[in-house]
Image: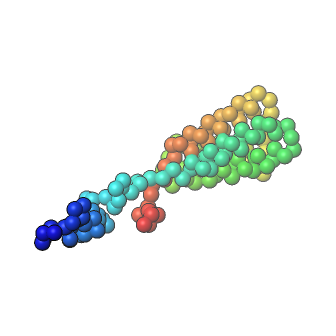
Amino acid sequence: MSKGRPPAGGVPLGRGASSPANRPARTPPSRPGSKRPDDRYGRPTSRRMALAPGLLGAIVVLAGLALLDVDTFIVIKYATAILAAIVGWFAIQGRTWWALPLLAAVLVIWNPVFPFDFHGQWWVAGQFGAVIVFIACAILVRVPAKREDARP
């Protein structure tokens, strides 16, 4: 065997896969004022905080169609009003002002404390209208992400 040469199939000393010369460089964390993103995909600028309560509200209202003439419909009214208030709060945080009157209407009409005695075809149409409002707000309401909310 000649001196200075590695054995056949071997890797020269100091140049193997684990040597510092062959390791990929780590990206340093971004610093304030730098133009480099914190991670590969960048930090999210907004979050869809109303997605879960909005879709849940749509499911509750659709389930309420089966319970329209039953005394337990009051549970559907409570859940709908509470979820409309939650989605409305996220709409305020996200400054989605067009959603507030729609959610306020759902909150007032499905209010279980001072209930309206709606029934018939218009009430069923109102149920479907509330489903559309909840789904639209779930998809379109975005809350700005704060720096301290970002993952490490």
Q: Is residue 109 visible?
A: no
Quadrant position of the N terminus in the picture? bottom left
Looking at the image, which residue is at 72% across and 50% down? 79
Q: Is residue 85 visible?
A: yes
Q: Residue furthest top?
A: 121
Residue 55, horizontal then vertical, whole percent: 62, 45
Residue 24, horizontal then vertical, whole percent: 27, 62
Locate residue 80 relative to residue 135 in the image: left or right: right
Q: Who is closer to the viewer here, 128 or 122?
A: 128
Residue 45, horizontal then vertical, whole percent: 40, 54
Q: Residue furthest left?
A: 3
How many numbered badges does the structure rendering display? Answer: 0
Q: Is residue 116 above or below residue 88?
A: above
Locate residue 85 relative to residue 11 in the image: left or right: right
Locate residue 23 relative to residue 56 in the image: left or right: left
Residue 15, horizontal then vertical, whole percent: 21, 67
On the image, which quarter does residue 64 sit in? top right
Q: Who is closer to the viewer here, 11 or 106?
A: 11
